Amino acid sequence: MKAWLITREWLGDHAASDKGEIVCLLNPRLSPERVWTLVEQLYVNEFGSINERVAYAKNAKSWPYHPKCGTAKTKSGKTVGWAYTITCGHNPWYHARPVENVTVAVDDQGKETLAWEEIEKPICADF
């Protein structure tokens, strides 16, 4: 199975989350633009204060942590935007990307574990 996977990432123990790394799985047919919007809203909901959420609802430009596209390399080594990797936030941040071979394993105690394979970014053609 393929899916868009959103995970919570961080640097250092001070930013670690007790909620784990998996934030959300989304339909793989969603466009990067739709995922972009959802990632930003999820991040605002988790990390924004009530004041910040109200300000965001009035004017999304007031929020300081807007999503960003990842990058990929072209055959000539040039760096270009890559819409299939989206990050949002500072530390911690959200990382959204399409993944494949998503499976769920259940142990003897009923604990579920999600596994997936990252999709390698292609080398893009020069424009």
Image: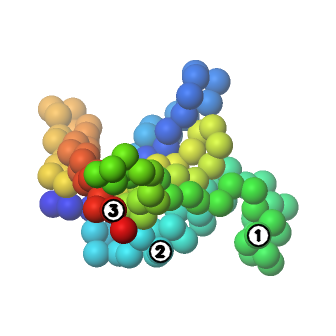
The residue closer to the viewer here, 116 or 125, is: 125
Q: Amino acid at mark 2?
A: Glu
The residue closer to the viewer here, 71 or 74, is: 74
Residue 34 at x, y = what percent?
46, 75
Q: Residue at x 79, y 75 (%)?
A: 59
Earlier along the polypeptide chain: callout 1 or callout 2? 2
Residue 125 in the figure: left or right of residue 55: left
Q: Amino acid at mark 3?
A: Asp
Residue at image mark 1: 61
Earlier along the polypeptide chain: callout 2 or callout 3? 2
Residue at image mark 3: 126
Earlier along the polypeptide chain: callout 1 or callout 3? 1
Vertical comparison of 7 with 91: above or below = below
Cα separation between marks 1 and 2: 17 Å
The residue closer to the viewer here, 75 or 45, is: 75
Determine whether the residue tagged by mark 3 lies in a helix, strand or loop: loop
Cα separation between marks 1 and 3: 33 Å
